[in-house]
Amino acid sequence: NFMQDASIWPVKTHVVLEILDRLPAPLSFPALGHRDKNPGAGDIVTLVVPRCTPALASTLRKRFPGLQATVGFADEASREEMQPWPREWRGFEDAGDSATGSILNAMLEAVETPLALVVSGAVLPDSLDDLMRLVRALDSRRLLAVAGPLVGEDRVYSDFCYRLALRHYTLRFDPVYEHSLIFDEASASSIRGNWFHEQDAGTKDGPCKLCETLPPTFLGRAQALRSVGFHPALDGEWAILDFSLRASRTPLVDAGQSAGSVAAASETPGLRYASGRFALCPFASMKEVPGLGGPHLYGRQDMPANGVSVASPWFGDDPSALGPVASPSAKAGRLSPSKQAKLFMESNHLKDFTGPDGVKRHFGCNLAIVNCPVPDWVYRGWAVPPCCKETMRHLLFYIDGVFRELGVRYIITDGVLLGSYKFGGMMDWDADVDLHIHNDDFHLLDEVVQHRVREDGHHLRKHANNRSWLLQANEQNYLLIELNLREEYWDPESVWQVPVEGRLFPAMEDAHLNLSSWYGLSFFRHRLRHVPEWEEEHRPMYCSTPYHYNCVDDTQVLSGR
């Protein structure tokens, strides 16, 4: 029913959120009770290493003796090279042919300790003391996972700490964090002056900043890792990034002062629980095992002097370029980095990936292929994918040039005209572009324009109603520029020129009257045009409400605001 009456859908959503608010918190944070003890006995931390080499296994044995471990190895020969096999270790075969996400899910089911040190690659805490710093951070704060920054073999510092900026199918990494953690309150409250000097800083637990992303090696609560889970088909740092994205947007933690108390719930439905957070703690040193390191997907913010992004191997076709530990088997074609990148983007409905180094990579449609299926976004209330919007922009600019050359008179109408009045651009929620062809020129579409469009490699077809032609990038691409014949009169000698996406387009004189007839006298409101404002006041609409065409999504604003 919500397809026909969109006002019903938000009401149903609020009822569901109120029910969820009455449930107990998905995650609890029991005290570990081992803040000052050495975890060498293995009763706190289990090493979880989805892909291990003999050299990495040797380092793990020496650096963390006595810790329990679940270790993945390529084959029995690799396991033999790892001898002597500690009695606390458990092995998982075929690690090179299986996706990291699948291996991690299986390994975490076998973890019996409250914490798990996930090692994806060759990055390890520098010592047992560094591991204990991470343990204390988890034990004293309501965190899902903690990690230290990486200092690679090239001695470059990378902390992997970002907020994930998601908007309209685009993923960006924002290094500006919102909150930090302080463990030494005495130091934090001290008055600073030119005489101030922190005593014994190296022996204290320094501050951490809160992040939405994790480095390839991190210490997490096993319960939390199992609750969110890893994508079973994603490999390496693609699996870690996918986990970070979902964990940072999954309501797992009671946001109130008193965990588990309904009284602590927010008055706004659906806000009782918040997503968990990760912490980056620079006092816990993390380094790559010499000779085993590799490039990282989202660690570096700089662009090397050679102009090639350090993250490039994660988008390429050569698995071995990821390093001796992170690289999967060359036989497992589905695990090639380029296929993994595409799978990550498709799984999360993303089209553009902008890394911390500023390099933007496109995974969307183009003019030569089938566009993103329209029902996958417009009927769900999602904004136009950037590649689809670019296709419509291209077609609008193209047909404007053709019409000017051939003398076909037209004006823009409907959504694109509304977007011009609102902010001079195309609406993020409009699924097509409507043009009104002058009555005296409509015959030229059949006689001249369709042949010109075919010569230019695009597709123009006549609508079944015989009063419209539909311009497409190609025969299989169903993003439309509608060329319509309408009863409404307009004088071609009196047209205005209005801005759309940096170019001027013709519109009828006093075009605001045209907008008022279609959208009412409140067309500047970001609201659902088919629902009266008195109803919206009690049943708030969002840009994501299906058929909410008259919306501008800066942040997800309530309609009418």
Image (cartoon, rainbow, N blue to C red):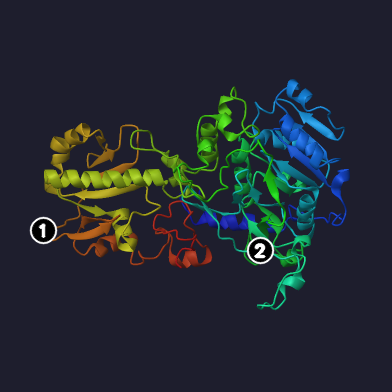
Residue in front for this viewpoint, 229 or 383: 229
Q: Going 48% across and 61% down the picture, which residue do you hit?
A: 555
Q: Going 75% across and 44% down the picture, which residue do you hit?
A: 117
Mark 1 or 2, closer to the camera: 2
Percent coordinates x, y for residue 111 in the rendering = 80, 40
Determine which residue is flagged by label 2: 180
Residue in front for this viewpoint, 86 or 492: 86
Residue in front for this viewpoint, 191 or 108: 191
Q: Amino acid at mark 1?
A: Glu
Percent coordinates x, y for residue 161 in the rendering = 61, 54
Secondary structure of the residue carrying tag 1 is loop
Mark 1 and mark 2 lie on one chain; the one further toward the N terminus is 2
Which label is found at residue 281? Answer: none
Residue 228 visible somewhere in the drawing: no
Q: Amino acid at mark 2?
A: Ser
Percent coordinates x, y for residue 405 in the rendering = 13, 44
Horizontal placement of 308 versus 99: left or right? Answer: left
Q: State the image quarter where residue 225 is shown.
A: top right
Q: State the image quarter where residue 95 is shown.
A: top right
Up the image or down, 26 lies above or below 475; here it is below
Determine which residue is flagged by label 1: 493
CA gap, disc 1 to disc 2? Answer: 63 Å
Residue in front for this viewpoint, 369 or 468: 369
Horizontal placement of 34 versus 169: left or right? Answer: right
